[in-house]
């Protein structure tokens, strides 16, 4: 499967027309024959650009209120026909089926309709796209010959491709867009499955005591029993749930014995050690003040010795994969203390938030850097111990509110600067906090969730005793930070991946 393909014809059938106009105009300028349907056809005609109605090609009108428009052999034959297969070519000539080289489809907004307050079942069902999803799959299957654009989010990339290559696509282009198309269809079908599955399983809702504050109502939609077994304590509150979610995200980064303490969704103490008791003590040492009233989580079985130490602190929730019987007796002394067994990892690959008058969704940040992801940026390269600490710190920075700086040494969080509007402020906050709790920063490492726009952060870190830095890189002034590090015998590695958390 190889070769370039000149786009000579395109089928365009989209729900949203945003940012489509420049694509249409560029296709017209390239002499591409445009086929279209319904509202998209009207949109193109209003641009004074020639367009062939699909029913003119098929000799069959739209029927059933627009439910059937493109489902026709002359459409799907034009997409699925293999340009290099003589039998396909002969059949297409026999039935007067033209090649369709580009398909642009934007599916009906099913998820958006489900999310609308007051949307009726009839409205939702009508937003299940049939023709569009079929076009996507057909064009993606035949990526050897056809380019498929399956989302309005890809219009800009398509336009750049058309401009740079004058309507010629390479196999790598078509395969890349086909991959996106299958992701689109998979996500769309999953959303429909989830909607219909609500009738097949209990739609659990938990009315919370209140929301973030007592004057706000709160509800949790979901099944906590799938993730946790509750052994003790009162019901989880809205704020507990936010912290538990952050704690689970963090602990899933680690395989070695690790203890973490979280407060307001940020880690205030984390340590990885051979023994759980040592992990607990070193996690607590990072900030014993903030640990008061926090959320505790570990990936190891809680033993009696560790439980005795933990029990000296007031905390709201503890999460672990298991507890010794004696450890459980110790922890259950306080009846309101919430004790959870974590039964499974988080399975959702997406995260969503409500904002403005809608919902935004994104892939969860599941990227965890390993040693092979580190690119040395300085003359000095990191030692094995520094690499371990840099990767440890980078796991923490990923789960801390931006702008953030993490300081770590010997697989222990020393301090963090969290939620600052300036990266310098975040670093200075972290240094001050580390000194407050008596940590020696000589030999420590620093992690940043995004690049350094200036050399000021590495200079401040150097003067505090920090000699190794991990950051994404990518600033137009990276060379300034690199030069400072080289002049002061500092190590700096780039990961190439930003980990903003807002």
Image (cartoon, rainbow, N blue to C red):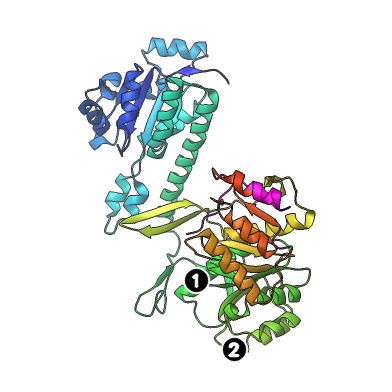
In the rendered image, which quarter is residue 215 located in?
bottom left
> Which circle marks residue 48 in the picture?
none
Q: Position of residue 368 (x, y in %)?
A: 63, 53
Residue span colored magenta: 482-502
Quarter assignment of residue 8: top left
Image x and y of residue 470, in percent: 65, 53
Q: Is residue 253 above or below residue 436?
A: above
Residue nearest the viewer, comparing 422 with 29:
422
Secondary structure type for disc 1: helix
- Alpha carbon separation for disc pair 2 and 1: 20 Å
Name the residue: 66% across, 62% down. 463
Residue drawn at x 73%, y 65% as measured from the top left: 442
Number of residues whose C-alpha sits closer than 10 Å to that of mark 2, classed few (under 14), some (14–19) or many (20 or more): few
Query: Callout 1 environment at 10 Å: few (<14), some (14 to 19), or many (20+)?
Result: some
Camera sees residue 72: no
Question: Viewer-proximal residue, 22 or 455?
Answer: 455
In the displayed structure, 428 sits above or below 376; it is: below
User: Counting residues from the N terminus, which is met first, the one under dot 2 or under dot 1?
Assistant: 1
- Does 497 lie within the magenta span? yes
Q: Does the stretch in magenta take in 385?
A: no
At a point 62% along the width and 61% down the height, the residue shown is 460
Q: Label 2 belongs to which residue?
A: 334
Identify the residue under disc 1: 241
Identify which residue, 256 or 224, lies in the foreground. 256
On the picture, is 467 further left or further right than 146?
A: right
């Amino acid at each position: 499967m190889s070769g370039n393909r000149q786009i000579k014809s395109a089928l365009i059938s989209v729900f949203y027309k945003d940012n489509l106009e420049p694509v249409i105009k560029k296709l017209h300028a390239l002499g591409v024959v445009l086929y279209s349907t319904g509202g998209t056809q009207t949109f193109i005609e209003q641009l004074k650009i020639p367009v062939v109605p699909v029913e003119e090609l098929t000799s069959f009108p739209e029927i059933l209120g627009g439910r059937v428009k493109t489902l026709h052999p002359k459409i799907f034959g034009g997409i699925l026909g293999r340009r290099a297969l003589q039998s396909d070519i002969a059949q297409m000539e026999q039935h007067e089926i033209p090649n369709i080289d580009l398909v642009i489809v934007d599916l009906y907004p099913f998820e958006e309709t489900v999310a609308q307050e007051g949307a009726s079942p009839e409205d939702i069902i009508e937003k299940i796209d049939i023709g569009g999803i079929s076009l996507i799959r057909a064009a993606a299957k035949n990526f050897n010959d056809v380019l498929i654009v399956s989302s309005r989010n890809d219009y800009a990339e398509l336009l750049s491709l058309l401009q740079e290559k004058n309507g010629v696509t390479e196999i790598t282009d078509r395969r890349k867009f086909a991959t996106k198309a299958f992701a689109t269809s998979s996500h769309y079908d999953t959303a429909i499955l989830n909607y219909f599955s609500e009738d097949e399983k209990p739609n659990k809702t938990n009315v919370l005591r209140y929301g973030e504050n007592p004057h706000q109502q709160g509800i949790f939609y979901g099944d906590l029993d799938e993730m946790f077994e509750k052994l003790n304590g009162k019901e989880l509150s809205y704020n507990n749930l936010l912290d538990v979610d952050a704690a689970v995200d963090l602990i899933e980064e680690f395989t070695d014995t690790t203890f973490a303490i979280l407060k307001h969704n940020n880690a205030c103490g984390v340590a990885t050690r051979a023994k759980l008791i040592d992990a607990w003590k070193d996690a607590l040492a990072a900030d014993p003040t903030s640990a008061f009233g926090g959320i505790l989580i570990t990936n190891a079985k809680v033993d009696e010795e560790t439980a005795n130490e933990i029990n000296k602190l007031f905390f709201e929730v503890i999460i672990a994969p298991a507890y010794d019987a004696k450890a459980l007796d110790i922890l259950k002394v306080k009846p309101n203390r919430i004790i959870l067994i974590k039964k499974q990892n988080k399975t959702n690959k997406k995260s969503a938030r409500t904002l403005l008058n809608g919902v935004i969704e994104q892939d969860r940040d599941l990227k965890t850097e390993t040693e092979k992801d580190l690119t040395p940026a300085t003359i000095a390269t990191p030692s094995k111990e520094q690499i371990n600490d840099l990767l440890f710190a980078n796991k923490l920075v990923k789960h801390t509110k931006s702008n953030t700086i993490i300081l770590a040494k010997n697989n222990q969080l020393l301090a963090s600067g969290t939620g600052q509007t300036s990266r310098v402020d975040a670093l200075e906050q972290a240094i001050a906090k580390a000194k407050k709790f008596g940590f020696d920063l000589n030999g420590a490492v620093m992690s940043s969730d995004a690049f350094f726009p200036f050399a000021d952060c590495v200079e401040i870190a150097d003067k505090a005793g920090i000699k190794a830095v991990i950051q994404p890189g990518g600033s137009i002034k990276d060379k300034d930070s690199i030069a400072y590090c080289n002049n002061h015998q500092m190590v700096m590695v780039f990961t190439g991946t930003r980990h903003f958390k807002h």
